[in-house]
Amino acid sequence: MPGSLAVALAAALAASPDLAADDEACWARASLSLRATWEAGIPSAALLFDPGRRAFAAERYLAPGDAERWLSALLRASAGIEAADWLGLRLDLDSGLLREQRFPSPVLACFSQGSPSGVDAAGSGGCVGMLRFALPSTALGPAELTSNGRPVGDEASSTLFVRQAYADLSVGRAGFVHLRVGRQRLRVADGLVYDDWGLAADLDVDVGAIGPPLAVGLSVLYPTRGWPTPDQWANPVLAASIDWLPSLGESVGLWAAFARDDAGEVGQILRQGAVASDVVRLTASAPGSAEYVAASRRLAVLVASPPRGAATLGWAGVSGRLDVGRRSEARFTAGAAFGSATSAVVRPGELPRAVEIPVSGWAASLRWTSQLGPVSVSPFLVWLSGDDPATEQEITGAAPQRYTGFLAVSPFLTALNLFFSGGIDEAYADRRATASGVNSRGVLAPGAEVVWSPVRGLDLALKAAFLWSDRVGPFGGRVYGPEVDLNVSWSPWPWLSILAEADALAMGSFFPQRALAHRLIVGIDLSTP
């Protein structure tokens, strides 16, 4: 085990409370998760600058990644108390998924006449003009301890490792009015729009306790795991839902949400499509040519520029869960995104200019589950609309072309382990604002999941799907490829779980190279009662 990770684990274990719940009104518990991961061929959309070649490493873009292996761990502690019949308090702390990582080292670059790409390291002596760019490079920095994919110090200062800290208030007959205030995990549109931890006030009213079988939900949330910034305080996400409850466990309803982004995150998402287009131009032109130099310089500006601009987005749709006979159920969520966002325009020698474009997109998640003794079978379909990156002429025209990819605040889908965010570590995924699919091209994923529970405490889950993009990718294809995942979980005792996961995605024509992306994880979870 790497030295710094071992030290962190030892300190975490020494500080963790080994407490069990004395009664339902006051409880505490802790858990430790250990993982060993091997993976290879995982494609990355990171664009890196190679100082030795004085050019971008375009051949690495969306290409099969290197083989990697690492050890990781997560420590979690939770406590709760029922302070009164109408008031409950809860606190959840966790370390995040701890592992050692090496990140690309930044290099200060400039425009240059002597470089074959028109971009060079700033210390080369051939710089032209005053613009300087901090670009991630192909050289890796020293290994450092990370939490949920970022330096552990950044995670500590941003979140204090607090995932949830809230008060539950219930009033009225049978507590039909329920208010939860504080840091908590919330979902909007079953994860299509938002599913993450954040500061929020969440109100649920079970109208059925006093009248018709309806449930109403209203939420005001700040979609950040850290403390909201001044801009974020002024722009909370608003969400609402109303559900008809025909019977216990069944629901059919409407949902809606609204968000405004002043930090430029949505503009950064739309920028990914422009980056992909220029990468294709690099691969199709000769170093030193006018087209190669122009594309390289646009990329330098795009990659190095901080997010800017604003977006105003709304979402609305339907969702439900219905029993079909005694052994089957249907779940569905579908909706549309609409509003406006900014997209970057880059001209030679200029900084990016943000131009507002209209936005609309569509998404749907459907699942049917049938229980056949110890086996459950669940065919599913996930569809998220995508779009091609807009050209400069389309963005700056008299009537800018509408962007039709589905944009979301912090989505979290677990239909598959590699392409989406499923698997045994899905609860620890780092979620953020994103567009659908790869480079905003969307995704269509019909598939199925089979879960077999032969004995108590043992579950084997097989998931498989074939994935297409909604639009043709930057390299001319639409096939992401087939993915097959196997998850195994065995809990011989309540305090112990042994886990394993094996995933494989055969990369198709959407990517520049055909290859097999695969991952293997083995782990163990230890917990107090």
Image (cartoon, rainbow, N blue to C red):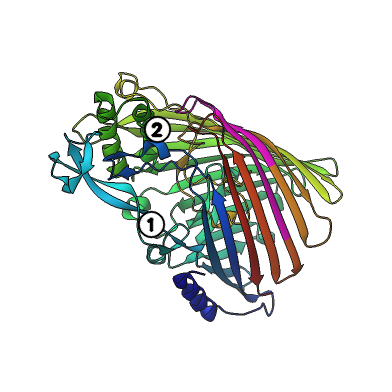
Instruction: Classify mark 1: residues with Cα within 10 Å, few (<14), some (14-19) or many (20+).
Output: some
Above or below: residue 155 compared with residue 404: below
Pick the residue in front: 15 or 45.
45
Q: Nearer the viewer, residue 402 or 184?
A: 402
The residues colored magenta run 464-489
Quarter occupied by residue 179: bottom right
Q: CA distance from mark 2 to mark 1?
A: 32 Å
Residue 472 x/y as whole percent? 50, 25
Q: Does residue 513 appear to the left or right of 175 in the view shown? A: left
Q: Nearer the viewer, mark 2 or mark 1?
A: 2
Dominant SS in magenta: strand
Q: On the picture, is 514 further left or further right than 57?
A: right
Instruction: Give residue 34's position: percent from left, percent from top.
Output: 59, 66
Give the residue at mark 2. Answer: 276
Q: Is residue 212 visible?
A: no
Look at 67% across and 77% down and name the residue there.
21
Query: For numbered disc 1, what is the local secondary structure?
Result: loop
| Residue matched to label 1 | 228
